[in-house]
Image (cartoon, rainbow, N blue to C red):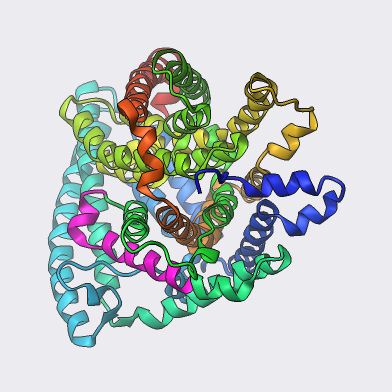
Protein backbone atom coordinates (compact mmCIF):
# COMPACT_ATOMS: atom_id res chain seq x y z
CA UNK A 1 0.00 0.00 0.00
CA UNK A 2 2.97 2.29 0.48
CA UNK A 3 3.07 2.94 -3.24
CA UNK A 4 -0.62 3.63 -3.54
CA UNK A 5 -1.72 7.22 -4.19
CA UNK A 6 -4.59 9.09 -2.61
CA UNK A 7 -6.02 9.97 -6.01
CA UNK A 8 -6.12 6.84 -8.17
CA UNK A 9 -8.83 8.40 -10.27
CA UNK A 10 -6.27 10.95 -11.48
CA UNK A 11 -4.24 8.09 -12.92
CA UNK A 12 -7.37 6.77 -14.60
CA UNK A 13 -7.79 10.20 -16.09
CA UNK A 14 -4.34 10.00 -17.65
CA UNK A 15 -5.26 6.71 -19.33
CA UNK A 16 -8.53 8.09 -20.59
CA UNK A 17 -7.37 11.45 -21.92
CA UNK A 18 -8.49 10.41 -25.38
CA UNK A 19 -12.06 9.86 -24.18
CA UNK A 20 -12.73 12.71 -21.81
CA UNK A 21 -16.50 12.30 -21.93
CA UNK A 22 -16.21 8.84 -20.39
CA UNK A 23 -14.56 10.41 -17.34
CA UNK A 24 -17.92 11.94 -16.48
CA UNK A 25 -19.32 8.53 -15.58
CA UNK A 26 -16.24 6.36 -15.05
CA UNK A 27 -14.24 8.28 -12.45
CA UNK A 28 -14.67 8.63 -8.72
CA UNK A 29 -14.52 12.45 -8.59
CA UNK A 30 -17.38 12.89 -11.02
CA UNK A 31 -19.53 10.29 -9.31
CA UNK A 32 -18.99 12.13 -6.05
CA UNK A 33 -20.44 15.18 -7.82
CA UNK A 34 -23.41 13.32 -9.36
CA UNK A 35 -24.35 11.61 -6.11
CA UNK A 36 -24.02 14.85 -4.16
CA UNK A 37 -26.18 16.71 -6.66
CA UNK A 38 -28.80 13.96 -6.59
CA UNK A 39 -29.06 14.23 -2.79
CA UNK A 40 -29.28 18.02 -2.96
CA UNK A 41 -31.97 17.89 -5.66
CA UNK A 42 -33.98 15.50 -3.49
CA UNK A 43 -33.63 17.88 -0.55
CA UNK A 44 -34.86 20.84 -2.57
CA UNK A 45 -37.86 18.87 -3.83
CA UNK A 46 -38.79 17.75 -0.32
CA UNK A 47 -38.30 20.92 1.70
CA UNK A 48 -38.96 23.95 -0.52
CA UNK A 49 -42.67 23.18 -1.15
CA UNK A 50 -43.30 22.85 2.62
CA UNK A 51 -42.75 26.21 4.37
CA UNK A 52 -43.86 26.58 8.03
CA UNK A 53 -47.33 28.00 8.60
CA UNK A 54 -47.43 31.80 8.78
CA UNK A 55 -43.78 32.11 7.81
CA UNK A 56 -43.99 35.37 5.87
CA UNK A 57 -46.25 37.06 8.41
CA UNK A 58 -44.00 36.12 11.33
CA UNK A 59 -40.92 37.34 9.48
CA UNK A 60 -42.58 40.64 8.60
CA UNK A 61 -43.73 41.30 12.17
CA UNK A 62 -40.39 40.29 13.68
CA UNK A 63 -38.40 42.49 11.32
CA UNK A 64 -40.63 45.47 12.11
CA UNK A 65 -40.04 44.98 15.85
CA UNK A 66 -36.29 44.51 15.40
CA UNK A 67 -36.00 47.63 13.25
CA UNK A 68 -37.92 49.67 15.80
CA UNK A 69 -35.79 48.45 18.71
CA UNK A 70 -32.52 48.91 16.80
CA UNK A 71 -33.44 52.51 16.06
CA UNK A 72 -34.33 53.25 19.67
CA UNK A 73 -31.55 51.49 21.60
CA UNK A 74 -27.75 51.28 21.15
CA UNK A 75 -27.85 47.59 22.13
CA UNK A 76 -30.04 44.61 21.30
CA UNK A 77 -32.98 44.75 23.67
CA UNK A 78 -35.10 41.95 25.09
CA UNK A 79 -37.81 42.74 22.53
CA UNK A 80 -35.24 42.58 19.73
CA UNK A 81 -34.08 39.13 20.82
CA UNK A 82 -37.63 37.84 21.23
CA UNK A 83 -38.50 38.96 17.72
CA UNK A 84 -35.33 37.37 16.39
CA UNK A 85 -36.18 34.16 18.25
CA UNK A 86 -39.61 34.12 16.63
CA UNK A 87 -37.92 34.10 13.22
CA UNK A 88 -35.42 31.52 14.37
CA UNK A 89 -38.20 29.17 15.42
CA UNK A 90 -39.40 29.01 11.82
CA UNK A 91 -37.89 25.79 10.50
CA UNK A 92 -38.78 23.71 7.49
CA UNK A 93 -37.47 20.72 9.43
CA UNK A 94 -40.66 20.82 11.48
CA UNK A 95 -42.81 19.17 8.78
CA UNK A 96 -43.87 15.52 9.09
CA UNK A 97 -41.82 14.53 6.03
CA UNK A 98 -38.74 16.20 7.50
CA UNK A 99 -39.21 14.35 10.80
CA UNK A 100 -39.42 11.05 8.93
CA UNK A 101 -36.20 11.84 7.08
CA UNK A 102 -34.55 12.78 10.38
CA UNK A 103 -35.55 9.41 11.85
CA UNK A 104 -33.97 7.50 8.96
CA UNK A 105 -30.78 9.57 8.81
CA UNK A 106 -30.32 9.93 12.56
CA UNK A 107 -27.30 8.72 14.53
CA UNK A 108 -27.36 6.59 17.69
CA UNK A 109 -28.92 8.51 20.57
CA UNK A 110 -27.11 9.81 23.61
CA UNK A 111 -26.44 7.38 26.44
CA UNK A 112 -24.50 7.27 29.69
CA UNK A 113 -24.11 3.74 31.09
CA UNK A 114 -26.09 1.39 28.85
CA UNK A 115 -25.12 1.49 25.15
CA UNK A 116 -28.34 -0.33 24.21
CA UNK A 117 -30.20 2.90 25.03
CA UNK A 118 -28.53 4.50 22.00
CA UNK A 119 -30.61 2.23 19.75
CA UNK A 120 -33.72 1.18 21.65
CA UNK A 121 -35.63 3.27 24.18
CA UNK A 122 -38.63 1.55 25.75
CA UNK A 123 -41.75 3.39 26.94
CA UNK A 124 -40.71 2.91 30.57
CA UNK A 125 -37.22 4.24 29.91
CA UNK A 126 -38.64 7.13 27.89
CA UNK A 127 -40.91 8.07 30.80
CA UNK A 128 -37.94 7.92 33.17
CA UNK A 129 -35.85 10.10 30.88
CA UNK A 130 -38.74 12.50 30.43
CA UNK A 131 -39.13 12.93 34.18
CA UNK A 132 -35.45 13.78 34.58
CA UNK A 133 -35.48 16.04 31.53
CA UNK A 134 -38.62 17.79 32.76
CA UNK A 135 -36.96 18.60 36.07
CA UNK A 136 -33.87 19.99 34.36
CA UNK A 137 -36.01 21.96 31.93
CA UNK A 138 -38.10 23.47 34.72
CA UNK A 139 -34.95 24.58 36.56
CA UNK A 140 -33.40 26.03 33.40
CA UNK A 141 -36.65 27.72 32.37
CA UNK A 142 -37.11 29.24 35.81
CA UNK A 143 -33.59 30.68 35.71
CA UNK A 144 -34.08 31.99 32.17
CA UNK A 145 -37.39 33.65 33.10
CA UNK A 146 -35.83 35.27 36.16
CA UNK A 147 -32.88 36.62 34.21
CA UNK A 148 -35.18 37.80 31.46
CA UNK A 149 -37.19 39.82 33.98
CA UNK A 150 -33.96 41.33 35.31
CA UNK A 151 -32.78 42.10 31.78
CA UNK A 152 -36.13 43.73 30.97
CA UNK A 153 -35.97 45.82 34.13
CA UNK A 154 -32.43 46.96 33.28
CA UNK A 155 -33.55 47.77 29.72
CA UNK A 156 -36.54 49.77 30.98
CA UNK A 157 -34.22 51.69 33.28
CA UNK A 158 -31.90 52.51 30.39
CA UNK A 159 -34.89 53.40 28.19
CA UNK A 160 -36.23 55.76 30.87
CA UNK A 161 -32.92 57.61 30.66
CA UNK A 162 -33.34 57.88 26.89
CA UNK A 163 -30.43 55.47 26.41
CA UNK A 164 -28.11 58.40 27.15
CA UNK A 165 -26.58 56.91 30.31
CA UNK A 166 -23.63 54.75 29.24
CA UNK A 167 -23.45 52.91 32.59
CA UNK A 168 -27.14 51.96 32.42
CA UNK A 169 -26.75 50.84 28.82
CA UNK A 170 -23.80 48.62 29.71
CA UNK A 171 -25.69 47.22 32.69
CA UNK A 172 -28.67 46.34 30.50
CA UNK A 173 -26.47 44.84 27.80
CA UNK A 174 -24.68 42.65 30.35
CA UNK A 175 -28.00 41.54 31.89
CA UNK A 176 -29.33 40.63 28.44
CA UNK A 177 -26.20 38.60 27.69
CA UNK A 178 -26.69 36.66 30.94
CA UNK A 179 -30.29 36.00 30.02
CA UNK A 180 -29.31 34.78 26.57
CA UNK A 181 -26.87 32.25 28.05
CA UNK A 182 -29.65 30.95 30.32
CA UNK A 183 -32.10 31.01 27.42
CA UNK A 184 -29.81 28.77 25.35
CA UNK A 185 -29.49 26.38 28.28
CA UNK A 186 -33.28 26.26 28.60
CA UNK A 187 -33.62 25.65 24.85
CA UNK A 188 -31.14 22.76 25.05
CA UNK A 189 -33.07 21.30 27.98
CA UNK A 190 -36.29 21.67 25.99
CA UNK A 191 -34.80 19.68 23.10
CA UNK A 192 -33.81 16.87 25.46
CA UNK A 193 -37.30 16.86 26.91
CA UNK A 194 -38.85 16.53 23.45
CA UNK A 195 -36.38 13.79 22.55
CA UNK A 196 -37.36 11.70 25.59
CA UNK A 197 -39.71 9.32 23.78
CA UNK A 198 -39.72 5.64 22.86
CA UNK A 199 -37.71 4.79 19.77
CA UNK A 200 -36.15 1.85 17.97
CA UNK A 201 -33.26 3.10 15.86
CA UNK A 202 -32.11 -0.33 14.69
CA UNK A 203 -34.54 -0.57 11.78
CA UNK A 204 -33.73 2.96 10.65
CA UNK A 205 -29.98 2.24 10.70
CA UNK A 206 -30.43 -0.94 8.68
CA UNK A 207 -32.46 0.99 6.11
CA UNK A 208 -29.89 3.79 6.04
CA UNK A 209 -27.02 1.36 5.50
CA UNK A 210 -28.91 -0.33 2.67
CA UNK A 211 -29.62 3.05 1.07
CA UNK A 212 -25.94 4.01 1.22
CA UNK A 213 -25.01 0.65 -0.26
CA UNK A 214 -27.31 1.26 -3.23
CA UNK A 215 -26.23 4.90 -3.60
CA UNK A 216 -22.49 4.25 -3.75
CA UNK A 217 -22.92 0.93 -5.53
CA UNK A 218 -24.74 2.69 -8.36
CA UNK A 219 -21.68 4.81 -9.09
CA UNK A 220 -19.31 1.85 -8.73
CA UNK A 221 -21.31 -0.06 -11.33
CA UNK A 222 -20.61 2.61 -13.95
CA UNK A 223 -16.98 2.79 -12.86
CA UNK A 224 -16.68 -0.90 -13.67
CA UNK A 225 -16.12 -2.01 -10.07
CA UNK A 226 -17.58 -5.27 -8.60
CA UNK A 227 -20.75 -4.07 -6.86
CA UNK A 228 -21.43 -7.42 -5.20
CA UNK A 229 -18.05 -7.47 -3.46
CA UNK A 230 -18.54 -3.84 -2.46
CA UNK A 231 -21.94 -4.58 -0.91
CA UNK A 232 -20.53 -7.40 1.20
CA UNK A 233 -17.66 -5.30 2.50
CA UNK A 234 -19.79 -2.20 2.96
CA UNK A 235 -21.93 -3.92 5.58
CA UNK A 236 -18.80 -4.30 7.72
CA UNK A 237 -17.58 -0.73 7.10
CA UNK A 238 -21.01 0.69 7.97
CA UNK A 239 -21.15 -1.41 11.14
CA UNK A 240 -17.81 0.02 12.31
CA UNK A 241 -19.06 3.53 11.45
CA UNK A 242 -22.17 2.94 13.58
CA UNK A 243 -19.91 1.75 16.41
CA UNK A 244 -17.92 4.99 16.13
CA UNK A 245 -21.14 7.03 16.29
CA UNK A 246 -22.21 4.99 19.31
CA UNK A 247 -19.07 5.82 21.28
CA UNK A 248 -19.25 9.48 20.25
CA UNK A 249 -22.81 9.63 21.65
CA UNK A 250 -21.73 8.58 25.16
CA UNK A 251 -22.33 11.53 27.49
CA UNK A 252 -18.89 11.80 29.10
CA UNK A 253 -17.06 11.21 25.82
CA UNK A 254 -19.20 13.82 24.10
CA UNK A 255 -18.44 16.36 26.84
CA UNK A 256 -14.72 15.67 26.35
CA UNK A 257 -15.02 16.64 22.67
CA UNK A 258 -14.12 13.25 21.19
CA UNK A 259 -16.31 13.05 18.10
CA UNK A 260 -17.11 10.22 15.73
CA UNK A 261 -14.10 10.97 13.51
CA UNK A 262 -11.56 10.00 16.17
CA UNK A 263 -13.45 6.83 17.06
CA UNK A 264 -13.92 5.80 13.44
CA UNK A 265 -10.19 6.05 12.75
CA UNK A 266 -9.32 4.38 16.06
CA UNK A 267 -11.58 1.37 15.50
CA UNK A 268 -10.36 1.05 11.93
CA UNK A 269 -6.73 1.14 13.09
CA UNK A 270 -7.38 -1.45 15.79
CA UNK A 271 -8.79 -3.84 13.20
CA UNK A 272 -6.15 -3.22 10.53
CA UNK A 273 -3.24 -3.48 12.98
CA UNK A 274 -4.42 -6.54 14.92
CA UNK A 275 -6.40 -9.11 12.96
CA UNK A 276 -5.92 -7.17 9.73
CA UNK A 277 -8.64 -5.81 7.49
CA UNK A 278 -10.32 -8.82 5.89
CA UNK A 279 -9.87 -9.11 2.13
CA UNK A 280 -13.61 -9.23 1.55
CA UNK A 281 -13.97 -5.84 3.30
CA UNK A 282 -11.35 -4.01 1.20
CA UNK A 283 -13.59 -3.41 -1.88
CA UNK A 284 -15.70 -1.14 0.39
CA UNK A 285 -12.75 0.71 1.93
CA UNK A 286 -13.19 3.74 -0.33
CA UNK A 287 -12.00 6.74 1.67
CA UNK A 288 -12.00 9.28 -1.16
CA UNK A 289 -15.32 8.18 -2.65
CA UNK A 290 -17.17 8.74 0.62
CA UNK A 291 -15.51 11.94 1.70
CA UNK A 292 -15.59 13.60 -1.71
CA UNK A 293 -19.34 13.02 -1.90
CA UNK A 294 -19.61 14.55 1.55
CA UNK A 295 -17.52 17.53 0.51
CA UNK A 296 -19.87 18.23 -2.40
CA UNK A 297 -22.67 18.36 0.17
CA UNK A 298 -20.52 20.68 2.30
CA UNK A 299 -20.68 23.19 -0.55
CA UNK A 300 -24.35 23.77 0.28
CA UNK A 301 -23.29 25.12 3.67
CA UNK A 302 -20.89 27.74 2.21
CA UNK A 303 -23.27 30.64 1.60
CA UNK A 304 -21.75 33.86 0.29
CA UNK A 305 -24.60 35.92 1.69
CA UNK A 306 -23.48 34.96 5.19
CA UNK A 307 -19.88 35.70 4.34
CA UNK A 308 -20.84 39.26 3.42
CA UNK A 309 -22.43 39.81 6.86
CA UNK A 310 -19.03 39.57 8.52
CA UNK A 311 -17.47 41.50 5.66
CA UNK A 312 -13.88 42.55 5.14
CA UNK A 313 -12.64 41.76 8.70
CA UNK A 314 -13.63 38.11 8.30
CA UNK A 315 -12.09 37.91 4.85
CA UNK A 316 -8.78 39.25 6.16
CA UNK A 317 -8.78 36.76 9.03
CA UNK A 318 -9.60 33.79 6.78
CA UNK A 319 -8.19 34.62 3.34
CA UNK A 320 -5.03 36.55 4.25
CA UNK A 321 -3.81 34.66 7.31
CA UNK A 322 -4.49 31.18 5.93
CA UNK A 323 -2.24 31.33 2.82
CA UNK A 324 0.53 32.99 4.84
CA UNK A 325 0.40 30.23 7.46
CA UNK A 326 0.24 27.48 4.84
CA UNK A 327 3.24 28.72 2.85
CA UNK A 328 5.28 29.53 5.96
CA UNK A 329 4.60 26.12 7.52
CA UNK A 330 5.48 24.32 4.29
CA UNK A 331 8.76 26.25 3.94
CA UNK A 332 9.53 25.57 7.60
CA UNK A 333 9.03 21.87 6.98
CA UNK A 334 11.31 21.89 3.93
CA UNK A 335 14.04 24.32 4.96
CA UNK A 336 14.25 23.82 8.73
CA UNK A 337 12.86 20.37 9.51
CA UNK A 338 13.94 19.00 6.12
CA UNK A 339 10.98 16.63 5.86
CA UNK A 340 11.85 14.18 3.10
CA UNK A 341 8.32 13.86 1.71
CA UNK A 342 7.05 17.10 0.19
CA UNK A 343 3.58 15.60 -0.22
CA UNK A 344 3.38 14.83 3.50
CA UNK A 345 4.63 18.33 4.30
CA UNK A 346 2.05 20.14 2.14
CA UNK A 347 -0.79 17.86 3.28
CA UNK A 348 -0.09 18.55 6.96
CA UNK A 349 0.42 22.26 6.27
CA UNK A 350 -2.88 22.49 4.39
CA UNK A 351 -4.74 20.40 6.96
CA UNK A 352 -3.55 22.61 9.81
CA UNK A 353 -3.91 26.02 8.15
CA UNK A 354 -7.12 25.75 6.11
CA UNK A 355 -9.88 23.58 7.55
CA UNK A 356 -8.66 20.19 8.61
CA UNK A 357 -9.68 16.97 6.91
CA UNK A 358 -11.52 18.55 3.96
CA UNK A 359 -8.49 20.57 2.92
CA UNK A 360 -6.19 17.60 3.52
CA UNK A 361 -8.23 15.41 1.16
CA UNK A 362 -8.26 18.03 -1.60
CA UNK A 363 -4.56 18.83 -1.20
CA UNK A 364 -3.52 15.18 -1.04
CA UNK A 365 -5.40 14.53 -4.28
CA UNK A 366 -3.78 17.54 -5.98
CA UNK A 367 -0.23 16.53 -5.05
CA UNK A 368 -0.92 12.77 -5.11
CA UNK A 369 0.15 12.12 -1.55
CA UNK A 370 0.25 8.54 -0.33
CA UNK A 371 -2.65 7.24 1.71
CA UNK A 372 -0.57 6.77 4.84
CA UNK A 373 0.54 10.42 4.59
CA UNK A 374 -3.08 11.53 4.47
CA UNK A 375 -3.85 9.31 7.45
CA UNK A 376 -1.03 10.88 9.45
CA UNK A 377 -2.19 14.42 8.63
CA UNK A 378 -5.81 13.63 9.51
CA UNK A 379 -4.78 11.96 12.77
CA UNK A 380 -2.78 14.99 13.89
CA UNK A 381 -5.67 17.26 13.00
CA UNK A 382 -8.23 15.25 14.99
CA UNK A 383 -6.06 15.11 18.10
CA UNK A 384 -5.33 18.85 18.17
CA UNK A 385 -8.91 19.76 17.22
CA UNK A 386 -10.22 17.88 20.27
CA UNK A 387 -7.73 19.67 22.51
CA UNK A 388 -8.26 23.15 21.06
CA UNK A 389 -12.07 23.03 21.10
CA UNK A 390 -11.93 22.54 24.88
CA UNK A 391 -8.96 24.70 25.87
CA UNK A 392 -9.49 27.73 23.62
CA UNK A 393 -12.95 28.80 24.88
CA UNK A 394 -11.83 28.16 28.48
CA UNK A 395 -8.75 30.37 27.94
CA UNK A 396 -10.79 33.08 26.20
CA UNK A 397 -13.21 33.23 29.10
CA UNK A 398 -10.45 33.16 31.70
CA UNK A 399 -8.68 36.20 30.24
CA UNK A 400 -11.91 38.10 29.55
CA UNK A 401 -11.42 38.28 25.80
CA UNK A 402 -14.40 39.83 23.93
CA UNK A 403 -16.75 37.31 22.32
CA UNK A 404 -16.26 38.59 18.79
CA UNK A 405 -12.46 38.48 19.05
CA UNK A 406 -12.56 35.04 20.64
CA UNK A 407 -14.98 33.75 18.01
CA UNK A 408 -12.83 35.06 15.15
CA UNK A 409 -9.73 33.53 16.73
CA UNK A 410 -11.33 30.10 17.10
CA UNK A 411 -12.97 30.20 13.68
CA UNK A 412 -9.63 30.82 12.03
CA UNK A 413 -7.61 28.22 13.95
CA UNK A 414 -9.72 25.24 15.03
CA UNK A 415 -9.74 22.81 12.12
CA UNK A 416 -13.17 21.12 12.08
CA UNK A 417 -16.38 23.08 11.42
CA UNK A 418 -18.31 21.12 14.05
CA UNK A 419 -15.63 21.72 16.67
CA UNK A 420 -15.68 25.46 15.88
CA UNK A 421 -19.45 25.58 16.44
CA UNK A 422 -19.16 23.68 19.73
CA UNK A 423 -16.40 25.97 21.00
CA UNK A 424 -18.31 29.09 19.91
CA UNK A 425 -21.48 27.88 21.64
CA UNK A 426 -19.54 27.72 24.91
CA UNK A 427 -18.74 31.45 24.72
CA UNK A 428 -22.07 32.86 23.55
CA UNK A 429 -24.22 33.79 20.57
CA UNK A 430 -21.91 36.39 19.08
CA UNK A 431 -18.87 34.16 19.42
CA UNK A 432 -20.73 31.27 17.81
CA UNK A 433 -21.92 33.44 14.93
CA UNK A 434 -18.49 34.95 14.23
CA UNK A 435 -16.60 31.67 14.66
CA UNK A 436 -18.92 29.71 12.37
CA UNK A 437 -18.89 32.44 9.72
CA UNK A 438 -15.10 32.78 9.77
CA UNK A 439 -14.79 29.01 9.35
CA UNK A 440 -17.29 29.15 6.48
CA UNK A 441 -15.20 31.85 4.78
CA UNK A 442 -12.09 29.76 5.30
CA UNK A 443 -13.75 26.66 3.83
CA UNK A 444 -14.07 28.50 0.51
CA UNK A 445 -10.30 28.15 0.18
CA UNK A 446 -10.50 24.35 -0.19
CA UNK A 447 -10.79 24.60 -3.97
CA UNK A 448 -8.39 27.51 -4.28
CA UNK A 449 -5.66 25.74 -2.32
CA UNK A 450 -6.16 22.51 -4.29
CA UNK A 451 -5.75 24.41 -7.56
CA UNK A 452 -2.56 26.20 -6.54
CA UNK A 453 -1.07 23.03 -5.08
CA UNK A 454 -1.75 21.28 -8.41
CA UNK A 455 -0.08 24.15 -10.28
CA UNK A 456 2.93 24.23 -7.95
CA UNK A 457 3.41 20.48 -8.12
CA UNK A 458 3.22 20.43 -11.91
CA UNK A 459 5.56 23.34 -12.58
CA UNK A 460 7.93 23.07 -9.62
CA UNK A 461 8.02 19.79 -7.69
CA UNK A 462 7.52 17.36 -10.57
CA UNK A 463 9.99 19.19 -12.83
CA UNK A 464 12.59 19.21 -10.08
CA UNK A 465 12.11 15.45 -9.85
CA UNK A 466 12.85 15.18 -13.57
CA UNK A 467 9.26 14.64 -14.72
CA UNK A 468 8.13 16.68 -17.71
CA UNK A 469 4.57 17.93 -17.44
CA UNK A 470 2.39 20.04 -19.68
CA UNK A 471 -0.20 22.69 -18.91
CA UNK A 472 -3.08 20.18 -19.22
CA UNK A 473 -1.55 18.15 -16.41
CA UNK A 474 -2.96 20.73 -14.00
CA UNK A 475 -6.46 19.84 -15.18
CA UNK A 476 -5.83 16.11 -14.94
CA UNK A 477 -4.33 16.50 -11.48
CA UNK A 478 -6.91 18.95 -10.14
CA UNK A 479 -9.46 17.08 -7.94
CA UNK A 480 -12.67 17.37 -9.96
CA UNK A 481 -14.98 16.94 -6.96
CA UNK A 482 -13.90 20.45 -5.93
CA UNK A 483 -15.87 21.72 -8.96
CA UNK A 484 -18.98 20.16 -7.44
CA UNK A 485 -18.17 21.74 -4.08
CA UNK A 486 -17.78 25.19 -5.67
CA UNK A 487 -20.79 24.80 -8.00
CA UNK A 488 -23.12 23.77 -5.17
CA UNK A 489 -21.86 26.65 -3.02
CA UNK A 490 -22.57 29.17 -5.78
CA UNK A 491 -25.99 27.69 -6.59
CA UNK A 492 -27.13 27.65 -2.96
CA UNK A 493 -25.78 31.15 -2.41
CA UNK A 494 -27.86 32.40 -5.35
CA UNK A 495 -31.00 30.62 -4.14
CA UNK A 496 -30.42 31.94 -0.61
CA UNK A 497 -29.99 35.49 -1.92
CA UNK A 498 -33.17 35.26 -4.00
CA UNK A 499 -35.14 34.08 -0.98
CA UNK A 500 -33.68 36.66 1.36
CA UNK A 501 -31.84 35.89 4.61
CA UNK A 502 -34.95 35.14 6.68
CA UNK A 503 -36.71 32.79 4.28
CA UNK A 504 -33.32 31.35 3.31
CA UNK A 505 -32.55 30.60 6.95
CA UNK A 506 -35.90 28.83 7.31
CA UNK A 507 -35.97 26.88 4.06
CA UNK A 508 -32.27 26.36 3.28
CA UNK A 509 -30.38 26.45 6.60
CA UNK A 510 -33.11 24.77 8.65
CA UNK A 511 -34.55 22.85 5.74
CA UNK A 512 -32.44 21.34 3.00
CA UNK A 513 -29.14 21.59 4.90
CA UNK A 514 -30.00 20.63 8.47
CA UNK A 515 -32.85 18.42 7.36
CA UNK A 516 -30.85 16.28 4.92
CA UNK A 517 -27.46 17.24 3.49
CA UNK A 518 -25.68 17.96 6.78
CA UNK A 519 -26.70 14.70 8.44
CA UNK A 520 -25.74 12.67 5.36
CA UNK A 521 -22.44 14.53 5.10
CA UNK A 522 -21.69 13.48 8.67
CA UNK A 523 -22.35 9.85 7.81
CA UNK A 524 -20.23 10.01 4.65
CA UNK A 525 -17.34 11.54 6.61
CA UNK A 526 -17.71 8.81 9.24
CA UNK A 527 -17.51 6.13 6.53
CA UNK A 528 -14.40 7.85 5.17
CA UNK A 529 -12.67 8.01 8.56
CA UNK A 530 -13.51 4.36 9.15
CA UNK A 531 -11.96 3.55 5.78
CA UNK A 532 -8.83 5.54 6.64
CA UNK A 533 -8.35 3.43 9.74
CA UNK A 534 -9.06 0.14 7.96
CA UNK A 535 -6.59 0.99 5.18
CA UNK A 536 -3.73 2.08 7.45
CA UNK A 537 -0.99 -0.01 8.97
CA UNK A 538 1.29 1.48 11.63
CA UNK A 539 4.32 -0.12 9.99
CA UNK A 540 3.75 2.08 6.95
CA UNK A 541 3.56 5.20 9.12
CA UNK A 542 6.57 4.39 11.27
CA UNK A 543 9.24 5.97 9.06
CA UNK A 544 7.31 9.26 8.92
CA UNK A 545 7.74 9.73 12.68
CA UNK A 546 11.52 9.78 12.51
CA UNK A 547 12.62 12.59 14.80
CA UNK A 548 9.00 13.52 15.45
CA UNK A 549 9.09 15.88 12.47
CA UNK A 550 5.36 15.72 11.51
CA UNK A 551 4.37 16.52 15.10
CA UNK A 552 6.88 19.37 15.30
CA UNK A 553 5.62 20.72 11.98
CA UNK A 554 2.01 20.70 13.15
CA UNK A 555 2.73 22.22 16.56
CA UNK A 556 4.96 25.00 15.17
CA UNK A 557 2.57 25.74 12.32
CA UNK A 558 -0.44 25.85 14.61
CA UNK A 559 1.39 28.07 17.10
CA UNK A 560 2.20 30.52 14.31
CA UNK A 561 -1.42 30.25 13.13
CA UNK A 562 -2.77 31.04 16.61
CA UNK A 563 -0.56 34.11 17.00
CA UNK A 564 -1.11 35.55 13.53
CA UNK A 565 -4.88 34.90 13.54
CA UNK A 566 -5.32 36.57 16.93
CA UNK A 567 -3.32 39.59 15.79
CA UNK A 568 -5.23 39.90 12.52
CA UNK A 569 -8.60 39.44 14.23
CA UNK A 570 -7.80 42.16 16.75
CA UNK A 571 -6.60 44.59 14.08
CA UNK A 572 -9.55 43.98 11.75
CA UNK A 573 -12.39 43.86 14.29
CA UNK A 574 -11.15 46.30 16.94
CA UNK A 575 -8.84 48.76 15.15
CA UNK A 576 -9.70 49.07 11.46
CA UNK A 577 -13.37 48.04 11.07
CA UNK A 578 -14.84 48.91 14.46
CA UNK A 579 -18.21 49.91 12.98
CA UNK A 580 -18.75 46.41 11.59
CA UNK A 581 -17.87 44.94 14.98
CA UNK A 582 -20.40 47.21 16.70
CA UNK A 583 -23.18 45.88 14.47
CA UNK A 584 -22.49 42.18 14.98
- Residue for point 28% across, 40% down: 389
Q: Residue 551 falls in which quadrant of the image? A: top left
Where the C terminus falls, by quadrant?
A: top left
Magenta range is 234-257
The residue shown at (52%, 61%) is: 511
Residue that extends furthest to the right in the rendered view of this protein: 18
| Chief SS of the magenta region | helix
Residue 510, percent across and down? Answer: 49, 58
Picture coordinates of residue 224, whole percent (x, y): 71, 65
Residue 313 lies in the magenta stretch: no
Residue placed at 29% from the left, 31% from the top? 403
Q: Whole-percent x and y of residue 69?
A: 39, 39
Residue closer to the observer: 500 or 155: 500
- From the viewer's perspective, tell me whether residue 26 is left or right of residue 186: right
Is residue 451 in view? yes
Quadrant of res 474: top right
Q: Is residue 255 magenta?
A: yes
133 on left or right of 292: left
Above or below, 480 relative to 52: above
Whether residue 487 is visible here, answered yes or no, is no
Locate residue 362, reporting x and y percent: 57, 40
- Which quadrant holds residue 35? bottom right
Which of 167 and 367 lies nearest the eye of the viewer? 367
* Residue 228 position (above or below residue 52): below
Q: Would you say 243 lies left or right of 25 here?
A: left
At 17% from the left edge and 66% from the top edge, which residue is drawn?
112
Amino acid sequence: MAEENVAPQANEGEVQRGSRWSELYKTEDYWAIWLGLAIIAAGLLVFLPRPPDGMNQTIEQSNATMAKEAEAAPFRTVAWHEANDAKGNLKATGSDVAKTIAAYTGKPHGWRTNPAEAFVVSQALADQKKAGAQEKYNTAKEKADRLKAEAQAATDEARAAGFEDKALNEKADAAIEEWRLAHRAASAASKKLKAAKPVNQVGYLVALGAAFMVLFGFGLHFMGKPVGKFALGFAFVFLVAVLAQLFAAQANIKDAGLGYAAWAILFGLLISNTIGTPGWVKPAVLTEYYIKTGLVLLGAEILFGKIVTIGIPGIFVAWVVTPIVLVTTYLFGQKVLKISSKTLNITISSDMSVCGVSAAIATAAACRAKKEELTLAVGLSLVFTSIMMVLMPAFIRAVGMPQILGGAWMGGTIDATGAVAAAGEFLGERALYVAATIKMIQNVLIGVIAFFVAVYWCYKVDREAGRQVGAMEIWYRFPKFVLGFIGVSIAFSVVYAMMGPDVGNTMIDHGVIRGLTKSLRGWFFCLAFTSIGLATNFRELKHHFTGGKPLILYVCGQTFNLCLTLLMAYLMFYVVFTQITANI
